Image (tube, rainbow, N blue to C red):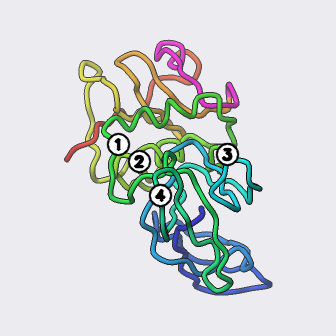
Amino acid sequence: MFGESFQIIKIENNFCYGKLLTDNYFGWIKLQDLGELPEASHRVIAIRTIVYKCNDIKSKSIFYLPLGSQVKIISKNKEWAKINLNPTSNIYGFITLKHLTPISSQVLDWVKIAESLIKTPYKWGGRDSISIDCSSLVQLSLQAGGISIPRNSSQQKLFEKLEPIDIKEFKRGNLMFWDGHVGILISKDKIVHSNAFHMMVSIENLSTVFKRIGNPSKTLKLIN
């Protein structure tokens, strides 16, 4: 994702293998997709935002940045932030300030972030507001709340800041795990999750989900 740091371990045939420093996730990426950026000061808090060539909504759009992207604000006024897209070439873009928040900020009700992504298409491995999977929905939502959690559901359920709870304790913000799947409770009896059954992020009654995929293996709450 734009603005995240990637540590290169080896390079083969214009691809590089390495580690995403956001969550220590290992994988391959095209060498041409990497570059140098200044340390980020803000991140995108909207589902996605447009980067414009000028600080004018009628100017040409360059590309979009999805939720969670990290940028360095060079300068700003009451409405626009100027960001650096390529320091070596002095290429800049402009984003509405309404879609940015300081890196250190925390959304208290981070579940709202997951709810804002309802109807986003499901894609295994997706980590973008164009397509997203179950564990990245959890990861990006918690990131908005100031919590860094691993990428995969198998890693997430072992996260040190989670502890098991009983059904009587179910409430908004609890994480519910199945084998290879995770969802977020929005209330004691409803869940939001990105799933291959609906092929999108959806809200369902727990009773409906239990009938379709069985009882969860774990239900966990966040601890301080």
Disc 2 to disc 3, how far (Cα)?
22 Å
Which numbered marker is on residue 77? 4
Question: Which residue is under mark 1?
Answer: 107
List x then y, in percent, for residue 70.
51, 62
Q: Residue 180: which quarter of the image?
A: top right
Q: Earlier in the sequence, mark 4 or mark 2?
A: 4
Q: Which residue is drawn at 50% across and 19% down?
A: 210
List x then y, in percent, for residue 100.
48, 52
Question: Which residue is under mark 3?
Answer: 124
Disc 1 to disc 2, how far (Cα)?
6 Å
* CB within 8 Å, label 1 to label 2: yes
Query: Badge 2: few (under 14), some or many (20 or more) residues near its Cα, within 10 Å?
Result: many
- Secondary structure at badge 1 equals loop
For the magenta stretch, what is the residue range? 197-210
Query: Badge 3: few (under 14), some or many (20 or more) residues near its Cα, within 10 Å?
Result: some
List x then y, in percent, for residue 207.
48, 12
The quadrant of the picture occupied by the N terminus is bottom right
Disc 4 to disc 2, how far (Cα)?
24 Å
Question: Which residue is under mark 2?
Answer: 144
* CB within 8 Å, label 4 to label 3: no
* CB within 8 Å, label 1 to label 3: no
